[in-house]
Image (cartoon, helix red, strand yellow):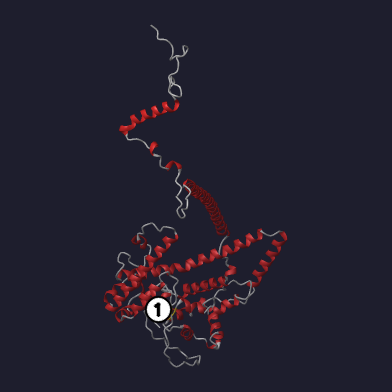
Amino acid sequence: MSWTNGFLTSCLVLTSLLSSSEAVPISVDKTKVKIPEETVQEAPQSVDTGLHYDRYLREVIDFLEKDQHFREKLHNTDMEDIKQGKLAKELDFVSHHVRTKLDELKRQEVSRLRTLIKAKQDIEGGNDMAVDHQALLKQFEYLNHMNPHTFEVEDLDRLIKSATKDLENFDKERHEEFKRYEMMKEHERREHLKTLDEEGRKKEEEHYEEMKKKHADHPKVNHPGSQDQLKEVWEEADGLDPEDFDPKTFFNLHDTNGDGFFDEQELEALFTKELEKIYDPTNEEDDMVEMEEERLRMREHVMNEVDANKDRLVSLDEFLIATKKKEFLEPDSWETLEQNQAYTEEEMREFEEHLAKQEEDLNLKAVDLQKQREELERQQEQLNAQKIQLQQAVEHMERLKKTEQPPEVHVEGNAVQEVPQHEQALPPEHQPAPPDQEAPAAQNDIAQQDLSQGHPNQSQDGQPLPHDPNSVHGAPHMP
């Protein structure tokens, strides 16, 4: 297989992916192990590095591996030169087809990052805000965001350096995550004790101590990477005679991808037997998260003792040199996790203070949200009341319109439709006269009134009445 596995599980992503694909021959001088006939096998899948740009990283390496010139330069390039970016300059000499594909991969990665930025903005509620993608892309140091269209030497240089840096910090972040896990577990246990009465707390504490004692009661754990530990794997996993143990043969048997190196996954696989002595998934007292942390501690320890050039890979030469050291032949005892608490009491106190502060902040936010909810409900009630008032006003107006309309009379046959009194036609004598006839008409009305009422000095038959001396009209004229 190519160096893909080794690189993706080490800091030096590029070198591990692009090594020779021929397997190292297995020595059988002392083991009489039958070598199986050579068969064509598919290349194993690359191990996920855990980096958020893992897919982009692996796709770039896969295409660079297809260029013969680049592969040859890789074999002749020193590890430190690769770290310093000298290998990246060879990108100018790869084939046009590979460069075109790398351009396409970069454009896809930039598009993916922009989509992630937009999604994060939507979640945070900034839909109406303008997004400065160029500024936000600066945080992704593994590519040149100023040129989102083509894959250049700077992109490869950034990718190598970023992967090296990120993978070097990956184990540290895992340890910190495990520490938080352990402190949270202890915090929850303490909080649970507070909810119990005195008798309940006593029983819970006794049970806790019993589980700790059961977990610590296990067979001796060999020092990782020591002769005793490897011989146990040789005997129990490989089914070989411990008296025939041979370091070179052991290395070749467990270099599962045949690239001439132990990568981190291949090393961790060697510790399975030791971990099974301590952890059983069916036991209440055994925590599988702690088992993975123990595996990580073992791998880091072996890397520190054996990996001379610190490339996070163990070569055959490094392995053979380590088997001649005193630490390999006469190792110290190995202290497991239960003998090395992941946190101090001071760290636990700070952690609980941080949790209390977080809880206080959440409570304040909850109160604020409740107030906002109540205000929204009050506003909604006001809107509902206004809506009801408006509806009532509309209904009142409709009723007024119906009452003001005259009743409609249905006409049947020769019946005449009833006309309101104020709209009925007046008789001719009551018709208003034209303006030039208004005065004579008024005089006629007065004369008619005199006729109907009679003159004051005439009797009803028209004869003049005698003068009344006491009457005003019959008073004698004064001389």
Drawn side of residue 204 relative to residue 68, left or right: right
Q: Please, is residue 153 above or below residue 439 in the view?
A: below
Drawn side of residue 269 relative to residue 215, left or right: left
Residue 454: % across, % down: 44, 24
The three-letter code of the residue at mark 1 reads Thr
Q: Give the SS element for disc 1.
A: helix
Residue in the picture at 32% in, 35% down: 434
Residue in the picture at 48% in, 48% down: 407
- Taking the view exactly as shown, the residue that stands out farthest to the right is 199
The residue that label 1 is drawn on is 4
Residue 118 visible in the snapshot: yes
Q: Which of 431 and 366 is in front in this view?
A: 431
Residue 259: % across, % down: 41, 82
- Taking the view exactly as shown, the residue that stands out farthest to the top is 479
Residue 102: % across, % down: 32, 74
Residue 10: % across, % down: 42, 74
Query: Based on the displayed image, in which of its 4 quarters is residue 25 positioned?
Result: bottom left
Q: In which quarter of the image is the C terminus?
A: top left
Q: How crowded is mark 1: few (under 14 residues within 10 Å), some or many (20 or more)?
A: many
